[in-house]
Amino acid sequence: MTSHQANWLYDGLTEGFPGDRATPCVHLPSGETVSYGALEAAAGRYSASFIASGVRPGDRVAVQVDKSLGALLAYLGAVRAGAVLLPMNTGYARGEVAYLLGDAEPALFVCDPSRVDDLAGVAKDVGAHVLTMDSAGEGDLAADAASRSDDAAPVPRAADDLAAILYTSGTTGRPKGAMLTHDNLYSNTRTLVEAWHFTADDVLIHALPVFHTHGLFVATHCVLLTGSAMHFLPKFDAQTVMDLMPISTTMMGVPTFYTRLLAEDGLAEAAKGMRLFVSGSAPLLAETHQAFEARTGHAILERYGMTETTMITSNPYEGPRRPGTVGRPLEGVEVRITDPDAKAGSIKLCAANTVGMVEVRGPNVFKGYWRMPEKTAEEKRPDGYFITGDLGMMDDDGVLHIVGRGKDLIISGGFNIYPKEVETVIDALEGVEESAVIGVPHPDFGEGVVAVVVPQPGATVTGAAVMDGIKGELARFKQPKHIAIVAELPRNTMGKVQKTVLRDTYSDVLAG
Ligand code: AMP
């Protein structure tokens, strides 16, 4: 870490920029390429525009915009201006936007021109100035930035100052704003660049959204810090991604990217020259990992992280990448597994191979939830460990296995059931593509197990066949009391199976 970074994150990233600023940084779908020099100058103009709009150091800049070069410039401009970016999912409806704006009280809100009529009132109520940006990155902000000079120095910010607030729904209740500092993001990027052997020769396929930690920070920062390049795509499209593989070296994706790629004929040929495929944000099925390796020769590198902590563990770059595991803690990051049944306030460590709560400590762990000190205190231990809400176990080799979210744990007749265990058994059955196991109200047992099963294309799977297949594999109390066969599971943009949706859909199937 260097000590002369006036703006910790911005200067830290630009130190990685190539000496020759004509080097390509962002390749756009239009065929246009933006050099490092052009990116830096534009970030300077966006920063000047924010400051001219009244944004002061520490102020929040909320953005709800489609992915474009403009969205990236808004992020870099905000950090350079010393502001705190608040990116919002483009799918959020008025009520959700209103809640986030009310909670974060940004100085500025940037939204799509088509939504100004709907949202300007809400923004004004919280005193936010409104600027527009459309899906091409054009609008008031771009127009204003074009008139500004690019030479103002980045606004000084220390390692511990906030760079971004990302809202996360976590378990239940209102979304919480995870406060990420300059050094949370900078230190994690340095670690990932080392761990995944990123160099200036890399070309990343960037098809992730940029309102989430994976696309906005993990993918983008690895490129910027190494002076490499990226194909910046508005969204994932299997054919486009395959067309780019021969002129790229790496891709970061969510598991659905990989299942969709596996449905394409030309995958093996396209992927030949790639160096690395990374997966995260949701569990990658072991079968997907194995099928991808069989087809392409590439073992997908699965890593684990979350909004509050950025990246926590990773499978190794060199050495076996084990399907169904998320690897070891990254350099400088500590992980421990604790007993959920320990007395309140006390900490009892779990032995190897025992499922417990995944806790993490390190420079990557966020500062806390925005304006929610009690919530922060509930989830952060006095010794600095953050309780992730995930359940997992460390095996004898110190490799982490994620078993599910704590809230997904099913308690039936007093017994704990880990959905992942049941899902793994069902997924291994002939003709089964994947499954999701949930707990729903049961008159006798409190909760009962329901399995939602997706057959492989062309296969026929019946509830009776699933029951037959798992009988000898799982204790009675873990066996589903209801099995639904469906064409696909509900997923969010990051590829996570939406178990809350399933719990709602099947809430009364065991009502009796
Ligand atoms: P988010 O804050 O949206 O990034 O979601 C974080 C959550 O996604 C984690 O707490 C995990 O439950 C889940 N997650 C992320 N990566 C993985 C992974 N590789 N395997 C299993 N779950 C994951």
Image (cartoon, rainbow, N blue to C red):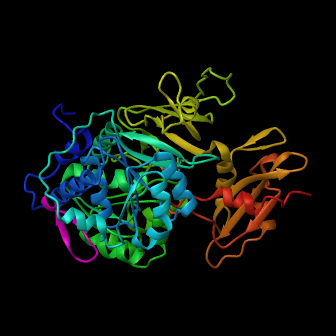
Against 274, is 13 above or below? above
Count every numbered label the image shows and give the total: 0
Q: At x 34% / y 67%, what residue is drawn?
A: 133
Quadrant of the image containing the N terminus: top left
Q: Residue furthest left?
A: 20
97 left or right of 23 in image: right
Against 383, is 168 above or below? below
* Residue 389 place in picture, x, y as percent: 58, 40
313 left or right of 413 in image: left
* Near-viewer residue (263 or 113): 113
* Residue 329 place in picture, x, y as percent: 42, 37
Residue 304 visible in the shown view = no
Residue 386 visible in the shown view = yes
* Residue 210 place in picture, x, y as percent: 39, 59
Residue 312 lies in what quarter of the image?
top left
* Near-viewer residue (25 or 92): 92
Q: Magenta stretch?
A: 24-38
* Residue 396 place in picture, x, y as percent: 52, 33
Quadrant of the image containing the C terminus: bottom right
Q: At x 64% / y 79%, what residue is drawn?
A: 458
Residue 53 on the magenta segment: no
Residue 25 on the magenta segment: yes
Q: At x 49% / y 61%, what residue is drawn?
A: 121
Residue 417 lies in what quarter of the image?
top right
* Near-viewer residue (470 or 35): 35
